[in-house]
Image: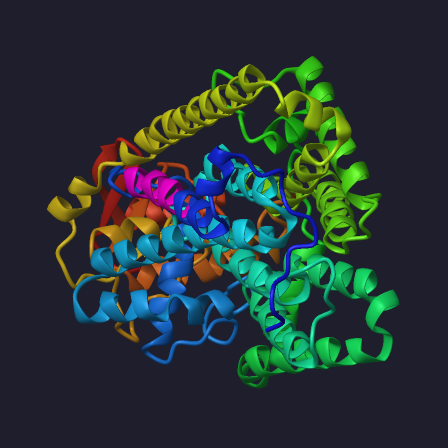
Amino acid sequence: MATLVTSETDPVTPSTERWTPRAITRVVGLLAGVMVLLELLHAGVIDSYDSGVYFDAAWRLWNGVVPYRDYVFVQPPGITLVLAPAALVGHLVSTSAGFWVGRVMSGAASVLNAVLVTSLLRSRGRVAMWVGGLAMTVTPITNVVGTGVKLEPFFMMFVLLGLRRLFASPTMTPSRRDLVWAGAFFALAISVKGWAVVPALVAVVVLLPRLRHRLLALVVSTTAGIALLFGPFFVLAPGAIWRQVVVDQVTRAVPSVTPTLNRLIDLSGYQGTWLAPNAFTVIGFLAVAGLAVYLAVTNPLRDPLGPFAGLTSVLATAAILVTPQFFAYYCYLVTPYLALALALVGSRFVHSPRWRTWRAEPRARRLVVATGALLVALLGGTTLSAYDQAASAAAATATAAIDRYVPAGSCVVYDVVYLGVVTNRLSDSPHCPLIIDSYGMWLGNGNQLVAPPRLFSEQWRRYFAHAQYVVLSNNESTFIPWTPALTRWFQGVYAPLYGKDGVHIFRRLATR
């Protein structure tokens, strides 16, 4: 990798001399680690549905059960490979233990992302490192996705590893080796989440004027990596992987569309906290973000990281606003790039003549440091409080009831497979129905916008007919394609055993 050089050093004072780039990186990593640790110690998991799906998919792969061919899986295959160590623990010890390892892996990736943003800004000065690293540490949206078993921390980790190869210094161009490695990391990111195509394409566009023909190494490496990672799954199920990962995702329709204002509020990261903005503060947030993006793109040093961060922020935000279905964690797709843009603007401000005037006043320096420390403490506390509130609601699910009413080794059909993961009630019997992503199955069958197709409901009836128990998150779960006929059949074949606290357990009486 190209040697890092500092194009413009920060103003040196006795206090800044103590904060070397390595020390700043360590502090950011330590703070991010503490935030993640406190969340891991909490019993609840935010967005347990997706977390259960991704872990179960990786767990099944160890048994030779392949996504797309053997069951519906609407995400790229990379997450099943990334979570392989956690899934192996799930086989050797228990699925609940493996899931915990998966959470630790996700948390470690979240910490590494904060460290990667900090180190990426190393040659842009200490202020840039502080701003970028702390933004990745104390913003709630980065922690909402950090300690479940989600796609976002892992795919962003690979993107940032690629960016370190391309934008390590504003004054040095990446070598051919750097370009090849960056392409490999981008391919890994795309294999986890398709949204990684956006930063990969923006990087090509930004670097094209500087590298021209040398950029072919990046394109070839990315393409080869994608072929290598997707290839085995495509060979086993060529039509299914294209339909589930591309067609069903791109053409998905939703019963209701989240308003643009709500999406912008979520983009701030503080929805659901006492700092949650309203329409007026959203305008202010957008103004600050827009100014940061503009200044990053138009930086006088011609640092390519600025245009990259600005353009990717704009494109990712636009994608979040126009996508039919919206989830709050989508906003994590913008956070690192906005953090980079803000960091570059902060560094630019520090080197301005006005800042040099303020720096001459000791009181002004102390005021800035105290304000910054107070802001970090306030935002960090708000983040942990928001996580505790959301995770406590998730932890209310009475998994103890599953332990009590469902014998180990039983064949169980779940609408939310997370319930089976954390209670060690997954069956790997070839005779037990294989349902991992019940919502994903809906995408290719009208996504609840029309009456469920007859064949789809009949498919679920066969699942129920081969199971011993059914565990639902809701007595009338919308993940199931209920029809009057299926409801009558189910009520005649299954008896309710338990029904409260987000868990409804049914035992099969007979097969008809």
Residue 64 x, y percent position in the rendering = 37, 80
Task: Indicate left or right for 407 with 392 as reference.
Answer: left
The residue range painted magenta reads 29-39
Whether the magenta-drawn stretch holds residue 37 is answered as yes
Q: State which quarter of the image contains the C terminus.
A: bottom left
The relative height of residue 91 versus residue 29 in the rendered view (above or below) is below
Q: Main secondary structure of the magenta part?
A: helix
Observer-nearest of 26 and 33 = 26
Residue 441 x, y percent position in the rendering = 52, 57
**Residue 468 can be seen, yes or no:** no
Whether the magenta-drawn stretch holds residue 19 is answered as no
Residue 129 x, y percent position in the rendering = 56, 44
Observer-nearest of 211 and 232 = 211
Name the residue located 38 percent from the left edge and 66 percent from the top edge: 83
Name the residue located 52 percent from the left edge and 58 percent from the top edge: 157
The relative height of residue 478 versus residue 455 in the rendered view (above or below) is above
Q: State which quarter of the image contains the N terminus.
A: bottom right
